[in-house]
């Protein structure tokens, strides 16, 4: 993933003729904090060694911002790539942050809730020197949720001796979380999908949508697509998915998943694998699970008109080129899933002001910023004759370059 992030930067830098000093500087993160720590299992006898990371890519524009993920594949390269993408994402949305990301190399599904809590608290105490409301503000990502953010906030606050809600975003509402944060990423994905439909001659309310992933992003995206009149025909979680060409009953599906802990076996739909779901006929494909799902092996088989990337890094470089050749439009992750960090920014602002907005206000502000960012990227893509991904990168890199240039080099 790190190679993908750097290759994307290199290709964009070349196309836009980026100053070689800035180009070189942006290829590596400013800070990378790697920790290992002991973790006691519930049986009390077993103590495992766990690895964790917090990477801050760019400290030029303000504090850094980015999620924390719990996943077995987490490593320094993956977290660094995600931190780099956060930089572009914040710059595209004109948020006063640099990019960061964190992660712990565990399988949260194999752990009890109390084990996850112990890991979270110990990991937080390991990264306390590098995080803080004015320094670096974590948020939820793959495998983490509101509760994990509440544990981080509590651990940080215990160390400081007073409550510091601003150290994380994506908190529960009662701890200073924002209305609309939990669906924000999915909402941003659907706003981008609707805008892309308008620009590329599709009618969103008549479209068929396939979603890979039924977590924070995928579930909200599917529900909002349904709410806006589209037909969600397939959706999957880690164990596989369900497909009904006439459309899925999402309310019944959500109850089934909550009750059974998986989507499989849902009546009135056919089972599909996570591989098959990407190749189903549809208008809009939303990969919203994990990275590297659309590759050179399956990019020729996709049967959609539009890919809107809810997940980070779901499309490899080779696949991107194949999709471009086939005329499939890709709305890139750094634009499509930026709704989450945008409402995280709103949460941070509301916390600083101690003045909280209604859900409607949050959603309206998000819609306004997402549409503005989509239009800026689309305009640049048309003007320079490049893909939406290249245009999004150029917009982000250009804004970062300007900030770096005006700050100058110390000393
Ligand atoms: P999540 O843990 O809430 O949900 C992940 C979903 O993907 C679950 O349905 C899970 O079953 C499924 N999944 C996990 N492993 C899989 C696999 N190997 N194959 C297929 N499906 C698998 O995570 P999330 O917060 O929804 O994040 C999903 C993606 O969106 C990640 O790439 C994340 O970085 C990105 N993202 C999340 C946010 C956010 O606000 N949560 C913001 C921006 C981007």
Image: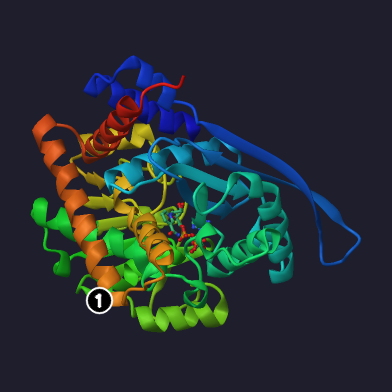
The residue lying toward the viewer, choosing from 304 and 335, is 335
Q: Secondary structure at mark 1?
A: helix
The residue lying toward the viewer, choosing from 218 and 339, is 339
Whether residue 222 is situated above or below residue 101 in the rendered picture: below
Specify how the rendered protein is coloured: rainbow
What residue would you read off at disc 1? Answer: 227
Residue depicted at x 41% and y 43%: 62
Residue at the outermost right position: 45
In the rendering, at what x and y percent does residue 156 appear?
64, 59
Q: Crowding near pointer 1: few (<14 within 10 Å), some, many (20+)?
A: few
Whether residue 12 is situated above or below residue 57 in the rendered picture: above
Q: Is residue 214 visible?
A: no
Which image quarter: residue 147?
bottom right
Which image quarter: residue 248?
bottom left
In the rendering, at what x and y percent does residue 193 appear?
22, 58
The residue lying toward the viewer, choosing from 398 and 182, is 398
């Amino acid at each position: 993933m790190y190679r993908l992030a750097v290759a994307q930067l290199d290709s964009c830098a070349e196309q836009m003729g980026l100053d070689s000093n800035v180009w070189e500087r942006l290829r590596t993160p400013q800070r990378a904090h790697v920790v290992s720590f002991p973790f006691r299992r519930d049986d009390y006898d077993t103590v495992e060694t766990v690895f964790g990371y917090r990477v801050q890519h760019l400290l030029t524009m303000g504090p850094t911002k980015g999620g924390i993920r719990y996943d077995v594949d987490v490593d320094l390269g993956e977290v660094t790539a995600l931190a780099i993408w956060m930089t572009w994402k914040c710059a595209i949305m004109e948020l006063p942050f640099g990019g960061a990301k964190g992660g712990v190399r565990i399988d949260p599904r194999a752990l009890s809730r109390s084990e996850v809590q112990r890991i979270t608290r110990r990991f937080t105490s390991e990264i306390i020197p590098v995080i803080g409301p004015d320094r670096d503000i974590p948020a939820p990502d793959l495998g983490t949720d509101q509760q994990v953010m509440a544990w981080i906030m509590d651990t940080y606050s215990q160390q400081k001796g007073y409550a510091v809600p601003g150290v994380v975003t994506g908190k529960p509402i009662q701890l200073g979380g924002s209305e609309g944060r939990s669906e924000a990423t999915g909402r941003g994905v659907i706003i981008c999908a609707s805008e892309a439909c308008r620009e590329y001659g599709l009618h969103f309310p008549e479209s068929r949508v396939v979603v890979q992933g039924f977590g924070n992003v995928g579930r909200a995206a599917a529900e909002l697509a349904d709410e806006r009149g589209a037909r969600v025909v397939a959706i999957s979680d880690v164990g596989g998915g369900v497909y009904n060409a006439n459309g899925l009953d999402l309310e019944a599906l959500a109850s089934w998943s909550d009750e059974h802990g998986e989507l499989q076996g849902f009546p009135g739909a056919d089972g599909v694998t996570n591989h098959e779901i990407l190749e189903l006929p549809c208008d809009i494909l939303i990969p919203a699970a994990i990275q590297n799902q659309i590759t050179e092996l399956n990019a020729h088989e996709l049967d959609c008109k539009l890919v809107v990337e809810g997940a980070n890094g779901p499309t490899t470089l080779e696949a991107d080129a194949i999709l471009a050749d086939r005329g499939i439009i890709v709305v890139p992750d750094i634009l499509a899933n930026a709704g989450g960090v945008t409402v995280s920014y709103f949460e941070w602002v509301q916390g600083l002001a101690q003045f909280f907005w209604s859900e409607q206000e949050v959603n309206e502000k998000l819609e306004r910023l997402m549409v503005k960012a989509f239009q800026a990227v689309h305009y640049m893509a048309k003007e320079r004759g490049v893909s939406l991904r290249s245009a999004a990168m150029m917009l982000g890199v250009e804004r970062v370059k300007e900030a770096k240039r005006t700050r100058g080099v110390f000393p």
